[in-house]
Image: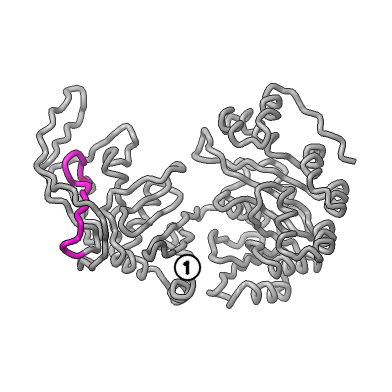
Amino acid sequence: MSEQQPHAAKHAPKPPVAGPAKPAAVAPAKPIAVTPVAAPPAAPIAGQGAGQPNVPRADQPGIIPLGSGYHNELFPLSPKPGIKDGTSKTGPYYINELGGLRIAEEVPGEPKINQLFRTVMLHEGSDLHLKSGLPGMMRLRNVIQRMNTPPIGNDLMWKLFQGIMNDKAHKQMDNDGGADFAHVVGDDECRFRVNMMKQRGKLAMVARRVNTSIPTFANLGLPPSIEKLCHYDQGMIILAGVTGSGKSTTIASMLEYINQNEALHILTIEDPIEFVFVDKMSVMNQREVYLDVVDWHVALKHAVREDPDIILVGEMRDQETFEAGVHAAETGHVVFGTIHASTAASTISRILDLFPPTQHHAVRQSLAFNLKAVVAQKLVPALKKSRTPTNEIMIMNPTIRDLILKSKDDKILDAIRIGFQEGMVDFTENLRQLVDRGDIDKATALEFAPNPEQLKMALKGIKVAAPGIL
């Protein structure tokens, strides 16, 4: 890994080589004095050959070197003898404002890229971001922040990727220009959902950290009526939300609740597997597409023959997936699925978009008699933790069934507000509950509210009467 590889870089200005740093006076009030050291010449991008433009390293003047005392070939930012870690107001894990986040120590025998995955684990970040020509980055507290690494060249990036790619990922990269797969760090210490891609002809990667421990409804801060949705014996339950809104985590918490409380057979079809379940009262079978089964359609075809009580079909991304889910629901199974939609009402139109207009009437019939609930979800900045979910819950009742059949989707939100005694809640009311509970502040609630004026009145205890819908 220590070999430097050639890498094309154009139009990059060459910064001046830094000279020795001047000794800094130590303020008597500070308990630890940090003495900067003379800086070496600027180092080239990792993975580039000689003669390429230089990029300032994190151990140049003004940036305190790493103090963990380790050295490795991939990120050789070892400290000078006797230099202690710096601290700053940005947080205990920073080297300082310019140096970036401290890198985790390398574990012998692991792929070199695991050092970056472990750095995300160390800081409890949510995503690892890698792009050729840039240092390692991560999303921490909902902000993209750099790690204390040199920029990584395209050739070195490919070497890092190869350490964790399987045959399927290689084929996907060759044929599609991108690959999705799961990566496990260590002895199932942490799982990541990895997406590798090409951009402007170079390599990049984003990996979402997946918690191996499955949170409870209370830990997530979900509405109490979520528990009610876990007791159906037939029908479809759809989780709606944009990418990264926590749909997978909410479904995992629901399946774990069932696993702990009911003796059933739960079958999941995933790409890739994110949460790993342990059999409790239920029997859990998890099938990963391309690893355990050739593709989605074969997995769904086989699912109804495997005596499941509950089936997780994952994302309803096309007409065939939705039809398979409906078929499973019609034959007496509970089906969990996800869809990219922002609200419960827009979920109906999003499903209809999968089909030609000539089939919309039949699809509405299927939804009216097989859909049990839609849970729409967003993540908002929280006070007690980094983010918390806010939900809109639509539970099928005669009123909503009639609105779906009559194509009156614009009235569904009013029906949700009227149905609060049945466990339904809209985003406005749920945001009010989060403010009252002290989970989020008022400003955040107003920012994410679909109707801020209505939320202001709700926070003052004024309830707006829902318009007549019948």
Residue 94 shown in magenta = no
Q: Residue furthest front?
A: 11
User: Height in image: 127 above or below 34?
Assistant: below
Q: Quadrant of residue 302?
A: bottom right
The region drawn magenta spans: 49-67
Considering the numbered disc 1 on the image, is that residue within a helix, a strand or a loop? strand
User: Left or right: where does residue 209 sit relative to residue 59?
Assistant: right
Pick the front one: 265 or 127: 127
Q: Residue at x 70, y 75 (%)?
A: 301
Q: Quadrant of the C terminus?
A: top right
Q: Quadrant of residue 183?
A: bottom left
Q: Residue at x 70, y 56 (%)?
A: 350
User: Height in image: 405 above or below 110?
Assistant: above
Residue 62 shown in magenta = yes
Pick the front one: 105 or 158: 158
| Magenta-colored segment: predominant secondary structure | loop
Q: Specify how the rendered protein is coloured.
A: one colour
Residue 107: x %, y % from top left? 30, 60
Residue 349: x %, y % from top left? 74, 54
Q: Quadrant of the N terminus?
A: bottom left
Q: Residue at x 12, y 49 (%)?
A: 40
Give the residue at mark 1. 179
Identified by mark 1, the residue type is Ala
Q: Residues within 10 Å of mark 1 (few under 14, many from 20)?
A: many
